[in-house]
Image (spheres, rainbow, N blue to C red):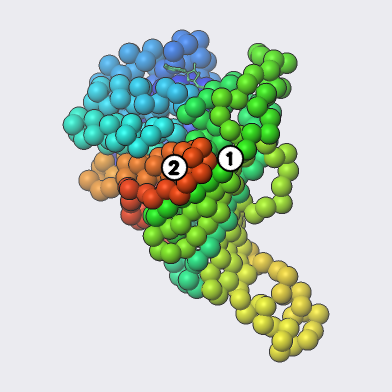
Amino acid sequence: MRKYRVGILGSGVISRTYAADIQAFYSRKLDLAACADIDAVRAEKLAEEFGIRKAYTTDELLADPEIDIVINLTPPGMHVELNSRIIRSGKHLFSEKPFAETVEEAEQVLKLAEEYGVRIGSAPDTFLGSGIQSLRYYLDAGLIGKPFFATANMVRAGHETWHPNPVHFYGKRSGPVYDMGPYYISALIVLLGPLESIASLSASPSPVRHIYRGANAGENFEAGIPTHYTCILKFKSGAVANLNISFDVGKSNLPMLEIYGDRGTLSYPDPNYGGGTPKIFRFEQCLSPIYQDTPEAHAREDRMYELPELFIRQKDYSRGIGVLDLAEAIENGTENRANGKLVLHVTEALQAIVSCADSEHFYKMRTTCERPEPLKPGSAADQV
Ligand SMILES: NC(=O)c1ccc[n+]([C@@H]2O[C@H](COP(=O)([O-])OP(=O)(O)OC[C@H]3O[C@@H](n4cnc5c(N)ncnc54)[C@H](O)[C@@H]3O)[C@@H](O)[C@H]2O)c1
């Protein structure tokens, strides 16, 4: 395939991970040719750090005929407006999450992309990493039988403990649901299929947040949204899940992702990461002490066993594989996996979680999607 020329819009914290990973892992197929920012100094700094040929304003980036795909890495509140501008410039788009705040907004952007004949990809793309793809392989191979229940828990301290600009993660389009929910909800959909209904409740234990890092360290600000959500999800398959998403928990022993089937349990470290070793507990381990009353049998009853990752793990925490997936799909005329239908379904779920917590009612999903095609074990590191 030809090399696709890529431009980054928004040269902040996560642009460094995209730039490093595209250059390290996908440079045979993606050429990181330009970066841009509303702040020229930031774009120049990113270009200098990574040897990117052009540091642009937004208009310059969108006017450059050489750029095929723009990766939108601006703050959440800018996504819909800038995604629309990128599409109108005739370029393919890969957007960071959240793609939009509401289904209506997401539908408008997707319709615009259709009108302009450009393709859409959106984060999260972490489900294309070796960890979740391996988990899916084992699930689909029937290792835990029929999955009927899952728990996903993204419960941790807020972004003010590590991010230099934490305020925009507490606005209406962000907060725990819109910022971290997409990773967990996408992973659950990729593993268990589309959602049927949702319920949720929220809590706001610490509305006043303190900034610990960056230029504004020492200041306080008020969160504009609840910062803890507890949700129940029902899938079309009949499986159910609970999902906790919180910026208020310093430490928890809840599993980040576990799937329970009638023949066992699969456990996974963190859907926000591309790499991660799945573990399994087979139902027979509960039975072994019935037949053999030995210390070994009892020890087996308490243990989960590591399963090998079946794909190449580029890095534990990586970004950019969704851009490769988009470029390959454009080249081959196929559907990319982190695609518009998936992002629309995820957006509806995010919107439903927030609205159900406000109104305390059950929500029936109106959109749906297919589980994206799995990757093939044994593929090259830059082959999706
Ligand atoms: N920081 C992370 O670890 C992380 C991880 C995964 C995803 N994300 C997502 O990536 C996006 C960016 O996050 P970040 O942490 O890099 O934020 P950031 O604040 O560090 O960077 C955002 C950049 O966008 C620029 N920008 C703002 N408005 C703009 C506009 N109108 N036009 C052009 N540029 C503009 C800012 O000047 C800044 O350089 C968010 O959607 C976030 O959810 C962040």
- The percent coordinates of residue 88 (x first, y second) are 24, 23
**Which residue is at the far top?**
40
Label 1 Cα crowd, 10 Å radius (few <14 / some 14-19 / many 20+): many
Q: Which residue is mark 1?
A: 202
The CA distance from mark 1 to mark 2 is 12 Å
Q: Position of residue 139 (x, y in %)?
A: 48, 65
Residue receiving disc 2:
352
Q: Nearer the viewer, residue 16 or 346?
A: 346
Q: Residue at x 56, y 44 (%)?
A: 201
**Percent coordinates x, y for residue 338 in the rendering:** 38, 44
**Horizontal arrangement in the rendering, residue 199 relative to residue 364 (left or right):** right
Label at residue 161:
none
SS class, disc 1: strand
Q: Amino acid at mark 1?
A: Ser
Residue positioned 72% across, 75% down in the render = 300
Which tag, 1 or 2, sits closer to the chain's start?
1
- In which quadrant of the rendered image does the N terminus lie? top left
Q: Are marks 1 and 2 in contact (CB under 8 Å)?
A: no
Which residue is at 58% across, 71% downward? 264
Q: Element type at marker 2?
A: helix
